[in-house]
Image: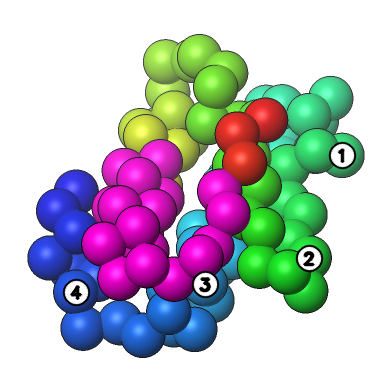
Amino acid sequence: MSTAAYSSYSCRELSMEAQRVSAAAAAAAGAQNSQHTKDVVATTAAVVIFWPAAFFVGGDNARTAELANLKGQMLAIEQASIQKKCGISFKRA
């Protein structure tokens, strides 16, 4: 996914969108990765976005395709954040 989709977003909007994508990944992975749900979504007031562990677990079904799409969105949001110097910290599980 291109960062162009997020070029008009403010830093606050990027943070909110990253949180939304993280939560969506947690929900999508919930059934197949229940052992990972504890680490999947955690955000702090300091704007630290934790990448869901589900992004790093393989599979071969519709959920895996959805997770791949969400991972692409998260990468694009992260790059847009870097380009705008938002100071959002993205932590991989």
Q: Which residue is mark 2?
A: 44
Q: Which residues are magenta?
A: 71-90
| SS for dot 2 | loop
First in sequence, mark 4 or 3: give its number: 4
SS majority, magenta: helix
Q: Which residue is mark 4?
A: 7
Looking at the picture, which amino acid does disc 4 mark?
A: Ser
Q: Which residue is mark 3?
A: 15
As drawn, the label of residue 38 is 1
First in sequence, mark 4 or 2: give its number: 4
Mark 1 to mark 2: distance in Å? 15 Å
Mark 4 to mark 3: distance in Å? 13 Å
| SS for dot 3 | helix
First in sequence, mark 1 or 2: give its number: 1
| SS for dot 1 | helix
| SS for dot 4 | loop
Q: Is residue 16 left or right of residue 31?
A: left
Local packing at callout 1 (Cα closer than 10 Å; few below 14, some 14-19, many 20+) is few
Mark 1 to mark 4: distance in Å? 32 Å
First in sequence, mark 1 or 3: give its number: 3
Residue located at (66% from left, 67% from top): 47
Mark 2 to mark 3: distance in Å? 11 Å
Residue 91 seen in render: yes
Q: Is residue 41 left or right of residue 8?
A: right
Q: In the rendered view, tell whether residue 82 sits above or below residue 25.
A: below
**1 and 2 marks in contact (CB < 8 Å):** no
